[in-house]
């Protein structure tokens, strides 16, 4: 079947909107929209009419660009368009309305359709834009919830440092011996309270994806290591029989290794494997050697190499009698002396690695295992440390 429309061209016609209500989807850019005007019930002769925009909930200059003009229908013409510019505006879940009014028709016999001479146009929010806004709001809400959790946990950090552990209070109620444990817990709590206050300043991991906590923790650990190292160095200086080398390998080494010791202990208790504990020790010593010693040494080497072609001669003139470089040995024999002094450490380190290898091979892991082997390993490694200290002290005193 075919649908045939017969146009009565004997009359001027009736002007109306093609649709009484238009829905316009906004975008992130300004856009032009053509509103359709039709001429029906006749198309004889030329006719004209005026159009203009009118505010409703949408405002001219904010939601759309005001416009007005003349629509001209030539003889036999049944279709025309009214261009309106819709301005880009952030909309979410709302619709704004404005009207385009047809008026002042001219032409013999021409008239308006009384029901459609003032069409309403609704500006709706774009669905894609609403989806983007929903995603952004969801992310912001998630981050805000994390921030609230972080704020709450940060507050709890400052509150919790004033109380001792619940385990100590439980021990008191278990038996009579628990009172001694509770007293010891109070003493340790008072000694650690200043440090707890200091480390309570570390923000929770909810802020900045955990990076803020990581950076502040590094600063705190570095500060504590510096304080402990300086105190150990000062303690060694007040002892008349304690040379700088002995102070370095005893008090200073112990002081700077305490944070690593506690970190390895925590990792060993919480992780199912010893990788984190062993890696923490080796990584910490690697940083001490490569950065603590290697970086200054590299800078000094570059400086003296660039200073003059015979820089080693100038270096010897300035520093061969420097007492702070005694650990290298006398001038002319510093490298061999340093190798000799490092030999006992190398031997002890090799024995330690062999012990870890044997534990992995026969006990299934570097840490843990049967109690007898745990104690035996602890005694063996402590003995290696004592041997290293003993040999180093003998070398410093000139005995060997």
Image: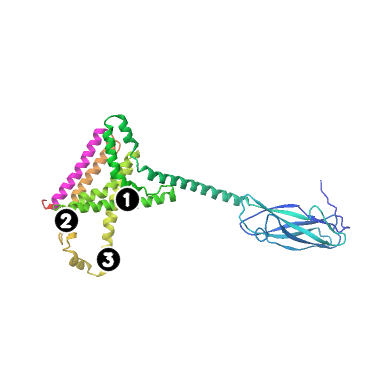
Decide if residue 138 is on the left or right side of residue 55: left
Q: Earlier in the sequence, mark 3 or mark 1?
A: 1
Mark carried by residue 337: 2
Specify the farthest residue to the top.
175
Q: Position of residue 108 (x, y in %)?
A: 87, 61
Location of the N terminus (image quadrant): top right
SS type, badge 2: helix
**Magenta-drawn stretch, dominant element (helix, strand or loop):** helix
Q: Could you tell whether 126 is left or right of 267 in the image?
A: right
Question: In the image, residue 46 lies at what x, y percent?
Answer: 84, 63
Tag count: 3
Give the number of the disc on residue 303. 3
Identify the residue under disc 1.
221
> On the picture, is 265 further left or further right than 104?
left
Instruction: Residue 87: give x, y in percent of width and height.
Output: 65, 59
Furthest-left residue in this view: 399
- Against 187, residue 212 (above or below) is below
Q: Quadrant of residue 31?
A: bottom right
Q: Is residue 387 magenta?
A: yes
Residue 235, position as x, y percentages in the image: 20, 51
Asked which secondary structure carries label 3, the reply is helix
What residue is drawn where x is 20% and y is 68%? 314
Q: Quadrant of residue 184?
A: top left
Q: Range of the magenta residues? A: 370-396
Considering depth in this image, is 175 or 132 the residue closer to the camera? 175
Q: Within the magenta stretch, is there residue 383? A: yes
């Amino acid at each position: 079947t075919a649908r045939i429309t017969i146009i009565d061209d004997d009359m001027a016609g009736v002007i109306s909107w093609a649709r009484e209500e238009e829905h316009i989807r906004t975008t992130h850019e300004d856009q032009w929209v053509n509103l359709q005007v039709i001429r029906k019930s006749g198309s004889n002769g030329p006719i004209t009419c005026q159009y203009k925009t009118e505010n409703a909930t949408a405002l001219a200059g904010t939601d759309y660009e005001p416009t007005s003009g003349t629509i001209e229908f030539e003889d036999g013409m049944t279709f025309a368009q009214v261009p309106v510019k819709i301005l880009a505006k952030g909309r979410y879940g709302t619709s704004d309305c404005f009207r385009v009014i047809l008026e002042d028709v001219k032409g013999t016999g021409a008239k308006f359709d009384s029901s459609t001479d003032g069409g309403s146009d609704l500006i709706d929010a774009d669905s894609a834009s609403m989806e983007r806004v929903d995603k952004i709001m969801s992310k912001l809400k998630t981050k805000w919830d994390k921030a609230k959790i972080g704020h709450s946990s940060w507050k709890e950090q400052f509150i919790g440092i004033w109380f001792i552990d619940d385990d100590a209070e439980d021990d008191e109620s278990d038996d009579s011996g628990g009172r001694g444990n509770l007293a010891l817990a109070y003493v340790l709590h008072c000694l650690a309270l200043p440090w707890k206050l200091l480390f309570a300043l570390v923000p929770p991991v909810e802020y900045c994806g955990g990076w803020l906590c990581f950076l502040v923790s590094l600063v705190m650990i570095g500060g504590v290591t510096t304080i402990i190292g300086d105190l150990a160095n000062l303690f060694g200086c007040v002892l008349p029989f304690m040379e700088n080398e002995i102070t370095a390998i005893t008090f200073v080494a112990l002081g700077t290794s305490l944070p690593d010791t506690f970190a390895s202990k925590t990792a060993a208790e919480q992780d199912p494997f010893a990788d984190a504990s062993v890696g923490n020790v080796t990584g910490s010593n690697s940083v001490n050697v490569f950065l603590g010693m290697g970086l200054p040494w590299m800078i000094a080497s570059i400086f003296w190499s660039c200073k003059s072609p015979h820089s080693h001669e100038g270096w010897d003139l300035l520093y061969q009698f420097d007492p702070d470089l005694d650990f290298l040995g006398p001038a002319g024999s510093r490298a061999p002396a340093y190798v000799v002094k490092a030999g006992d450490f190398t031997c002890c380190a090799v024995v330690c690695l062999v012990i870890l290898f044997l534990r992995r091979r026969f006990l299934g892991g570097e840490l843990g295992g049967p109690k007898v082997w745990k104690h035996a390993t602890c005694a063996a490694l402590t003995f290696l440390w004592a041997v290293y200290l003993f040999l180093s002290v003998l070398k410093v005193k000139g005995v060997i």
